[in-house]
Amino acid sequence: MNARTPHKRERLDVAPAALLALLPAIGRVMINSERLGATHERIGTVEQVRIEDGWLVCEGKEHNSRIELAAIATVIVDRTSVMREKSYPCIELRGADGESIANVTGFEGLDPFDAVLGEFPQGVELAVEERSGNGLGERKELDADDAGLEPFAAAERSGGRVRIEFSRPSFWQAWEGDMPAVKPVMGYVNVMQPDFHLHLKGGSVGGWRREDGTDQLRFVALAADGAETGLTVTGAPASFG
């Protein structure tokens, strides 16, 4: 591997499966995706990467994600994010339409990230994009009766165990655990644990479809027009009071 100066932002010509197979070597990473007002994030070390029926599966105590490999048309690396003097480099996975499928952000700084990226040819340099942030400052308060709060508030009151799943075309991710306190901050419903964050924009959920199983309740988030958003919350009936 030849010494080189990494680009701040570049498009890689690599097989996504070959690159993503090395995620365990990067250390703690955040895998996240967003759609229709919901951002679902898993944070920690990927312990195992495997391929199953054309989907790349990331597993571990802190990860449970699936990404459709054939849908990834472009791999972009961005090294511009710095917070409190620490770098958070990111691998952006985009579809043929240019839209984001998922992002993988390194939490251990540039050294382990670039050690992995150094196994592949340097990419084509791209212009650095101006970023407007993640939108968490768009609204100052969350309405007390925001529909997005409903299953989370019920599970918080009951102290129940829940499974929060998120899906969009070519991506799926889940977290399961005891329901933490819901934090309505900056116009978002926030559910946060060390290995998991959900940020749900106020007003993005018009209601929930309740599905009763023999031993599980499932709540499916619906947009204002009744379409499924890809966010679901599942647990035993007692988990929701």
Image (cartoon, rainbow, N blue to C red):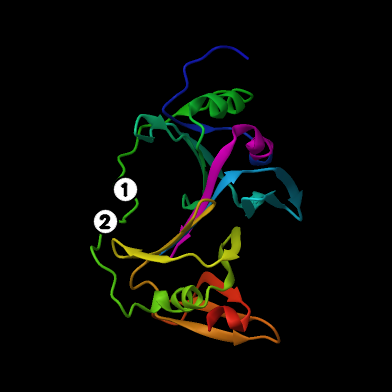
Q: Label 1, on which residue?
A: 133
Q: Foreground: 123 or 203?
A: 203
Circle 2 SS class: loop
Q: Which residues are magenta?
A: 18-36
Q: Residue at x 44, y 75 (%)?
A: 153
Q: Is residue 47 above or below residue 116?
A: below
Crowd band around label 2 with a 10 angstrom C-alpha radius: few (<14), some (14–19), many (20+) = few
Residue 23 painted magenta: yes
Horizontal and vertical percent for residue 98? 47, 49
As drawn, the label of residue 228 is none
Q: Residue at x 71, y 87 (%)?
A: 214
Q: Residue furthest left?
A: 140
Q: Foreground: 232 or 34?
A: 232
Q: Is residue 199 above or below residue 233?
A: above
Horizontal and vertical percent for residue 36? 42, 66
Q: CA distance from mark 2 to mark 1?
A: 9 Å
Amino acid type, residue under disc 1 in the picture: Gly
